[in-house]
Image (cartoon, rainbow, N blue to C red):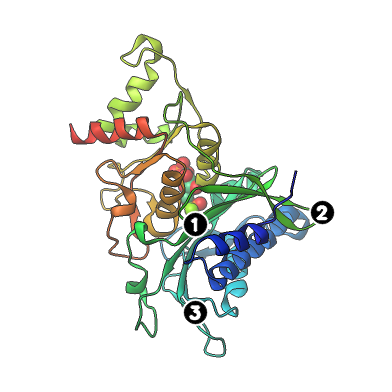
Amino acid sequence: MRRVTLMQYLIEQERQYDWVNADLRLLIEVVSRACKAISIAIGKGDLVGILGGAGSENVQGEAQKKLDVISNEILLEANEWGGHLAAMASEEMDKPHQIPHRFPRGEYLLLFDPLDGSSNIDVNISVGTIFSVLRCRDGVCVPDERAFLQPGAAQVCAGYAVYGPSTLLVLTLGHGVACFTLDRESGSFVLTKSDLRIPEDTGEFAINASNARYWEAPVKRYIDELLAGKDGPRGRDFNMRWVASMVADVHRILTRGGVFMYPRDTKDPKKAGKLRLLYEANPMAFIVEQAGGGATNGRERILDILPDALHQRVAVILGSKNEVERVTAYHAA
Ligand code: AHM
Ligand code: MG
């Protein structure tokens, strides 16, 4: 079988679609190289003393792990000099990161969660990187927070890397989803699955059940029905999985179906959910929709939400289409 590397795949995309240009290709290649560097760092773990806390907090008041900080630095440094970006934004930084004046500026905005699921680092469970690419509007000289406040439907590209038993890169450019596996010997990401599809129905769900007492009524109703199994209204048994790394949970859903929920709850009424819209929910929603699944906040399609803040949170319900539609319908009832 012909081996297709990420670079070959992107060149083919560029030939096929007008709007995939050399800058976008470079951007994705650079992000993939950064993910490779993060994967190598994670693989070394305790051998080089990079597990554990960094002793600092991010803008959202969350304790940072050393690898959160290292991964953020790797992505910033890799993407600064290529001339493909107008600015970057990250879960780990309060404000957008501007491209230093000594480098040319490009037309794209890059957003990322450098290390998603970082509470799992120290216990050697899969973590990942999530990224989203937007176009910077014409005439914006210094892209501040407002430049990034575009709905998810405006994304040019989105992807994630999972650092698990294999390192994978999953990517959408808006016409299907492809998955690449890092060949550790050659150092290349090799296309291992194209046109991923999420089954419309599923027997598996993912939610952090320790929050059950804070859930809103529609979520309680939906989960109660699943838990009732074949004796309940659904008439069949469901299985539950929760890795607590969104990348790993979403990757499972892309592989064999399922529904992932981090709903709004009453634990902290000021927060609309736990996950962040711009660099967690939007890229994952784009990928899931491109694979035939659904993604809502219970009330509306995630990709249609007009953001009002860089680090805004959102409820997330995504995965197998029929289940996402059911939960969403329960919210409207
Ligand atoms: P992080 O970006 O700080 O790692 O937080 C996001 C993670 C998701 O990967 C995961 O789905 C969720 O938080 C798990 O939350 P909880 O620990 O409440 O189950
Ligand atoms: Mg995250």
Residue at (35, 73) in percent of width and height: 147
Residue at (58, 67) in percent of width and height: 25
Amino acid identity at mark 3: Gly
The residue at which mark 2 appears reads as 185
Marks 1 and 2 in Cβ contact (< 8 Å) = no
In the rendered structure, the answer to whether residue 106 lies left or right of residue 70 reads: left
Residue 56, percent across and down?
Answer: 52, 65
On residue 317, the disc is none
**Which mark is first along the chain, 3 or 2?**
3
**Which mark is first along the chain, 1 or 3?**
3
Amino acid identity at mark 1: Leu
Q: Is 80 drawn above or below residue 33 in the view shown?
A: below
The residue at which mark 1 appears reads as 173
On residue 106, the disc is 3
Q: Is residue 317 visible?
A: no
Mark 3 CB near ligand 2 (8 Å cut): no
Few, some or many residues within 10 Å of mark 2 (<14, 14–19, 20+): few
Mark 3 and mark 1: Cα distance apart in space: 18 Å
Q: Nearer the viewer, mark 2 or mark 3?
A: 3
Mark 1 and mark 2: Cα distance apart in space: 27 Å
